[in-house]
Amino acid sequence: MKKIITIALGTLIFTSCTNSKKNAPFELKGILTDSKGETLILEKLVSPQPIVVDSAIINDKGEFEFVNYKPHIGFYRIKLSQSNFAMLVLDSMDKVSITGSVKDLGNTYKVTGSEETKIFLEYNEFSKKRDKKLDSLNQVFYALAEGKQYTEMQRDSLSKTFEEPYTQIMAGFNEELSKKILTHKDKYSSIMAIQGMEPDKFADLYKALDEGLQKKYADDKNVKMFHEIVTKMLASALGQSAAEISLPNPDGKIISLSQFKGKYVLIDFWASWCGPCRKEMPNVVAAYAKFKDKGFEIFGVSLDQSKDKWIEAIAKDGITWPQVSDLKFWDSEPAKQYGVQSIPYTVLIDKEGKIIAKNLRGDELEKKLAEILK
């Protein structure tokens, strides 16, 4: 049954689009050297895996043309194999021409007729330059470290020596990339380029790209998803007011984050099943003991599913601060609100409920608390 449904869907895609060439100006064709009559596959990149939308055979002159599919704006690739493909960003009005070699399509292809793909490739080249610089820096580091017996202190000192040039490379790259994204703030390709840039440092950039894409592609699924992600990111960005959390504690009593207004509060996302969380907990316990009488509180939000295991972990780890949970695992509403992607994850808010730091752990947490709770 599953196989029949797949074939039926494939037939629907191809037959419903067969006459699209007559009705729209879209073209996707090209010439590839070193060909022996291979078949090219056109895939649309969607979650959880790419979807095949068309295919084309390369003729004896190296020519090919996809004629059965009219794209909606999105990320695509033409593929010879899983490791030999060319990335494209296509829209319904493009007239795309591609050249390259079938021996190494990804590193040889050139594209005309697609503004979005042109910008995407510019971003790609930009990233390659950055990675080349970082690779050179890494090679120097490993050359100095390889085969030598360093104490932990010496190794830490060596690492710190390389932190500054690494930071400078990344800062320069991010500054230049920011300018480029602002230039292309309504371009679909910029969705890919902005990923990896810290929302707390580049909140205005995320906002500008989101607004530009909303104006141009408001109905697109990926743009809608990007908008939702950015909205959550900005809601929990530094300087923003922390979203309210009201959930039951182990006794079933509803406790709200706003109850602790007037104190510095660390929102601690964790779970009994999370090894790194449990390993970090002694540091959190120590920080609480040291600062709880100086206007500091912790508000624990568990991503547990089992109430019994949650309560057991609270007792075993010596947790004495307020704890709440909706016992919904990764579907926890506060985790969604705060854009939590991994745990342990912390958010520090000031007396007025503004977010002032995120993801503080160990010594970093104690240093920050010592700084603000003098």
Image (cartoon, grey):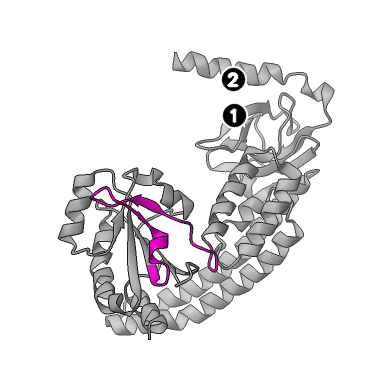
Q: Distance between the Cα atoms at labels 2 and 1? A: 8 Å
Q: Secondary structure at mark 2?
A: helix
Where residue 37 appears, as percent x and y from the top left, is 66, 29
Towards the viewer: 339 or 321: 321
Image position of 283 (left or right of 221): left
Amino acid type indicated by mark 2: Gly
Q: Neighbour class for label 1 at 10 Å: few (<14), some, many (≥20)?
A: some
Residue highlighted by disc 2: 10
Q: Residue at x 65, y 64 (%)?
A: 204
Towards the viewer: 267 or 151: 267
In terms of image quadrants, where is residue 64?
A: top right
Segment tinted magenta in the rendering: 237-265
Q: Is residue 187 visible?
A: no
The label on residue 203 is none
Where residue 240 appears, as percent x and y from the top left, is 55, 64
Q: Residue at x 57, y 71 (%)?
A: 170
Residue highlighted by disc 1: 52
Of the 4 image quadrants, the one containing the N terminus is top left
Residue 248 belongs to magenta span = yes
Q: Secondary structure at mark 1?
A: strand
- Are the residues flagged by discs 2 and 1 in contact, CB closer than 8 Å? yes
